[in-house]
Amino acid sequence: MAASQFPPNVTDREKHSAERFAALSYLEEAWEGAMLDGLPSECVAQAALFRAFAELVERFGEEAVAAFAEELPERLRRGEFTLAVATQ
C-alpha cells in the first residue's frame, strides 16, 4: 500500500481486513499480558493510542492522520469501537 493511500482503497480491503484481524489478535495477547502484570487498563490504552498514532504519523504524515482523527468522534458515537453492549 502506498503511503498516500490512507485508509486503504476498496480493492485492498479484503487483504487488509485479514491483516488487521491478525494484528488485533497480537494486540489482544499483549493487552492480556499487561493486565496479568498488573498494569492499569487505562495506561495500556493510552500507551497503545500513542504508539498507534506515532506509527500512523510516521507512515502517512501528520496531515493525513489529523484528517483521520477528525472522524473519530463521530465513529465513537456510532459505536464502532464498542466491544460489547450490556442488555438489561
Image (spheres, rainbow, N blue to C red):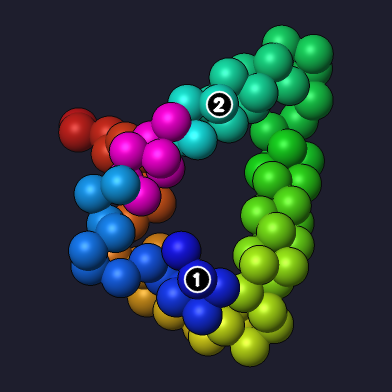
Confirm whether the magenta stretch covers residue 39.
no
- Look at 66% across and 55% down and name the residue there: 52
Disc sitting over residue 21 in the figure: none
In the rendered image, residue 32, in percent from the top left (x then y), is placed at 62, 18
Hey, what amino acid is under mark 2?
Tyr
Pick out the residue farthest to the top. Answer: 36
Quarter of the view holding residue 38: top right
Quarter of the view holding residue 18: top left
In the rendered image, residue 31, in percent from the top left (x then y), is placed at 64, 26
Q: Is residue 33 above or below residue 70?
A: above
In the rendered image, residue 17, in percent from the top left (x then y), is placed at 31, 46
69 or 1: nearer the eye?
Answer: 1
> Does any portion of residue 35 appear in the rendered image?
no
> Does any portion of residue 4 appear in the rendered image?
yes
Neighbour tally class for label 2: few under 14, some 14-19, many 20 plus, Cα within 10 Å: few
- Look at 70% across and 59% down and name the residue there: 55
Tell me the magenta residue range.
16-22
Q: Which residue is mark 2?
A: 26
Relative placement, left or right, of 81 versus 48 is: left
Q: For the residue labelled by badge 1, is the local secondary structure a helix, a strand or a loop? A: loop
Hey, what amino acid is under mark 1?
Ala
Q: For the residue labelled by badge 2, is the local secondary structure a helix, a strand or a loop? A: helix
Disc sitting over residue 2 in the figure: 1
Relative placement, left or right, of 57 versus 66 is: right
